[in-house]
Image: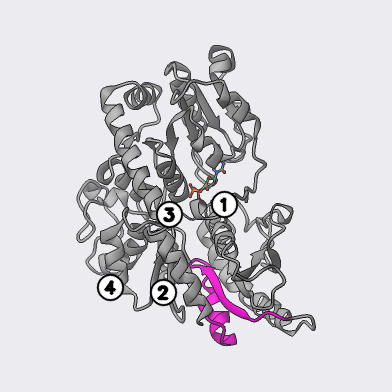
């Protein structure tokens, strides 16, 4: 096996999309590929949301000038920001790569560029420089195959979506209903559609990587394999095949682990709505009282910006901290994978981002599903109605919240959900072990890249 500094190690250039839910799986994939001993990793990254390099001494970083202004980086402008990055970054990425190849101490060749599908400028640069490239989608297979259906749904007149049809099944996409689509109630979906269409094209990519698991999404994967004429590698859940690494953009509050150590097994509810979703102040207050009234211990992530434009924690209602006392803990950002792996955590109330979904399934933690926007809707539908390892909670009202928590954590029905999640976890663990699908795909991927 090749070692660091060994000339046989070939270089992989990763191009992540600069958001937490995209950055994590890309860096995990890089760490997994590096740990095979065949590759060294360079992460080409925008100035916006640049990862903390000191957390990743094993990687090299290649800055890309992104030309974004403060106004561009407002959290509410995801679609326009990504569109802008694709325009602004192309030339600077091309120049950075060219400089990298011209360096006098340059010994490695670039085996390939692995880019997040949303960063499609990287595919254009790879094509022009004649470097092989591979597309990596960080969402589920169901979400990826849904993007391919939007043009036809538009042609058939289903888009723009109508509220009166919200509960009807979408043609060809059972069990998704119109309200489960990522464009449902998405402000500015007209701009989102072309972005999704472009980011779904493989272009000159020689392979397609997905952070999912064969056993979880067989039928969606079958559709994708029919739609794309390139080899497919399902290497999820990537966080389970990579050495542990932290790519959090907010500092993780490790002190919550000592607090979790004091809680009884399976007693604690972990609550987080991820890195982008936001709620209004009234919903935050309802969440607080629902948690206060449920009588279960809870660990709640209230990140800055959860309520748009505020620190969040300062908006918690008067009396909340006193009533909850030591039973609850509110923090700004958690070491989420460690939290979900902790034996005291018995359930996860989540917005159902795809990483959170995979992380919860991998630890066998049943979920309460409150999707906020985008692909979270479809993920929540699969969790609650296909795999049936989560309960849907759509109404941010204290009574509903209390009932959902008690149902999942203290009822027979909840126990059945937990059992199904334990079974699903077993399948995932099987997939990452020798002879399992993910294990084999990683092995094949290494051989495939080395043969490029
Ligand atoms: N995460 C974390 N600490 C937190 C909340 C989230 O480390 O307090 C991580 C989580 O483990 C996941 C990512 O942030 O890997 C969020 O990605 P996801 O796809 O679940 O949601 P998004 O933030 O993209 O909506």
* Quadrant in which the N terminus appears: bottom right
Give the residue displayed 70% in from the left and 66% down from the top: 60
Question: How far separated are the C-alphas under marks 1 and 3?
Answer: 24 Å
Question: How far separated are the C-alphas under marks 2 and 1?
Answer: 23 Å
Q: Can residue 319 be seen in this view?
A: no
- Mark 3, Cα crowd under 10 Å, few <14 / some 14-19 / many 20+, is many
Q: Mark 4 points at which residue?
A: 226
As drawn, 64 above or below 390: below
Q: Name the residue under label 2.
A: 201
Question: Looking at the image, is mark 2 or mark 1 earlier in the sequence?
Answer: 1
Q: Disc 1 on helix, strand or loop?
A: helix
Question: Looking at the image, is mark 3 or mark 2 earlier in the sequence?
Answer: 2
Q: In which quarter of the image is residue 114?
A: bottom right
Q: Disc 3 on helix, strand or loop?
A: helix
Front: mark 3 or 4: 3
As drawn, 357 above or below 158: above
Q: Residues at badges 2 and 1 in contact (C-beta under 8 Å)?
A: no
Front: mark 4 or 1: 4
Give the residue displayed 42% in from the left and 18% down from the top: 294
Question: Looking at the image, is mark 1 or mark 3 earlier in the sequence?
Answer: 1
Along the viewing direction, whichever of 230 and 343 lies nearer the viewer: 343
Question: Looking at the image, is mark 3 or mark 4 earlier in the sequence?
Answer: 4
Q: Quadrant of residue 258?
A: top right
Q: Is mark 1 within 8 Å of ligand 1?
A: yes
Q: Disc 2 on helix, strand or loop?
A: loop
């Amino acid at each position: 096996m090749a070692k660091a500094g060994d000339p046989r190690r070939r270089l992989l250039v990763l191009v992540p999309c600069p958001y937490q839910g995209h950055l994590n799986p890309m860096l995990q994939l890089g760490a997994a590929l590096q740990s095979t001993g065949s590759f060294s990793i360079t992460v080409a990254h925008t100035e916006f949301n640049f990862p903390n390099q000191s957390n990743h001494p094993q990687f090299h970083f290649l800055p890309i000038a992104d030309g974004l202004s403060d106004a561009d980086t407002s959290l509410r402008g995801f679609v326009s920001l990504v569109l802008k990055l694709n325009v602004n970054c192309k030339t600077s990425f091309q120049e950075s790569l060219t400089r990298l190849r011209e360096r006098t101490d340059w010994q490695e060749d670039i085996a390939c560029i692995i880019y997040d599908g949303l960063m499609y400028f990287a595919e254009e640069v790879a094509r022009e420089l004649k470097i092989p490239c591979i597309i990596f989608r960080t969402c589920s297979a169901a979400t990826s195959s849904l993007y391919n259906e939007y043009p036809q749904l538009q042609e058939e007149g289903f888009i723009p979506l109508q509220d009166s049809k919200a509960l009807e099944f979408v043609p060809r996409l059972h069990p998704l209903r119109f309200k489960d689509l990522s464009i449902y109630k998405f402000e500015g979906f007209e701009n989102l559609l072309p972005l999704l269409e472009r980011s779904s094209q493989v272009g000159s990519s020689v392979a397609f990587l997905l952070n999912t698991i064969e056993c979880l999404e067989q039928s969606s994967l079958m559709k994708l394999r029919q739609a794309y004429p390139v080899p497919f590698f399902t290497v999820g859940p990537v966080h389970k095949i990579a050495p542990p690494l932290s790519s959090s953009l907010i500092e993780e509050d490790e002190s919550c682990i000592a607090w979790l150590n004091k809680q009884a097994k399976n007693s604690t509810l972990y609550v987080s709505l991820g890195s982008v979703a936001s709620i209004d102040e009234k919903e935050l207050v309802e969440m607080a009282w629902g948690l206060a009234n449920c009588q279960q211990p809870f660990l709640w992530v209230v990140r800055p910006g959860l309520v748009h434009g505020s620190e969040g924690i300062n908006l918690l209602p008067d009396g909340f901290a006193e009533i909850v006392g030591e039973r609850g803990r509110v923090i700004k950002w958690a070491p989420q994978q460690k939290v979900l792996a902790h034996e005291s955590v018995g359930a996860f109330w989540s917005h159902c981002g795809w990483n959170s979904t995979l992380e919860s399934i991998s630890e066998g933690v049943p979920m309460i599903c409150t999707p906020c926007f985008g692909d979270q809707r479809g993920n929540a539908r699969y969790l609650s109605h296909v795999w049936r390892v989560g309960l849907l909670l759509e109404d941010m009202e204290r009574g509903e919240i209390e009932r959902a928590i008690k149902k999942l954590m203290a009822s027979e029905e909840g126990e059945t959900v937990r059992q199904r999640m334990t079974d699903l976890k077993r399948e995932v663990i099987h997939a990452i072990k020798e002879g399992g699908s993910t294990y084999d795909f990683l092995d094949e991927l290494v051989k495939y890249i080395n043969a490029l």
